[in-house]
Image: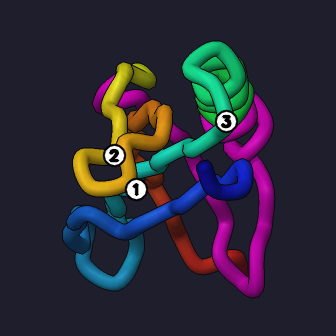
Amino acid sequence: MGDTTIYLMLSGGYRSKRDRVDRLYVLYDVYAESPAEAGALAFTVREYLLEKLPGQSIDGVLVLDVREQAAPSWHPDMQSLEPAYTGEVCLYLVADD
């Protein structure tokens, strides 16, 4: 088994309003030593993304909103057989002028 790890990966997106609003899809994978630990951590990541990230300004980009695309679900790694959960959110971003 490997270390507890959280991966965030861009899974798609588009400019939803010319030169104003970007919409990005972000997939998150959470690996841990046990299914219970991976699941608990995945739901903690979900809570942060949905509840704490909106309104944050990061390097000149304001996170307007975060919407859930897929709640965390059991998705063990097929090669390493490590316990893992995966979920997806959609971020709405604008330039923080």
Depth check: give the residue in front, 90 or 43. Answer: 43
Q: Which tag, 2 or 1, sits closer to the chain's start? A: 1
Q: Where is residue 60 in the image (x, y as percent from the top left)?
A: 72, 84
Q: Where is residue 4 in the image (x, y as percent from the top left)?
A: 72, 49
Q: What element carries label 3?
A: loop
Depth check: give the residue in front, 59 or 10. Answer: 10
Depth check: give the residue in front, 84 or 2. Answer: 2
The image shows a total of numbered marks equal to 3
Residue 47 visible, this angle: no
Q: Quadrant of the C terminus?
A: bottom right
Region of the chain picked out in magenta, as a range: 47-70
Closer to viewer: mark 3 or mark 1? 3
Q: Is residue 50 magenta?
A: yes
Q: Which residue is drawn at 22% across and 66% down?
A: 12
Closer to viewer: mark 2 or mark 1? 2
Viewed as shown, does residue 2 lie left or right of 24? right
Q: Residue 77 carries which label?
A: 2
Q: Position of residue 61 (x, y in %)?
A: 65, 76
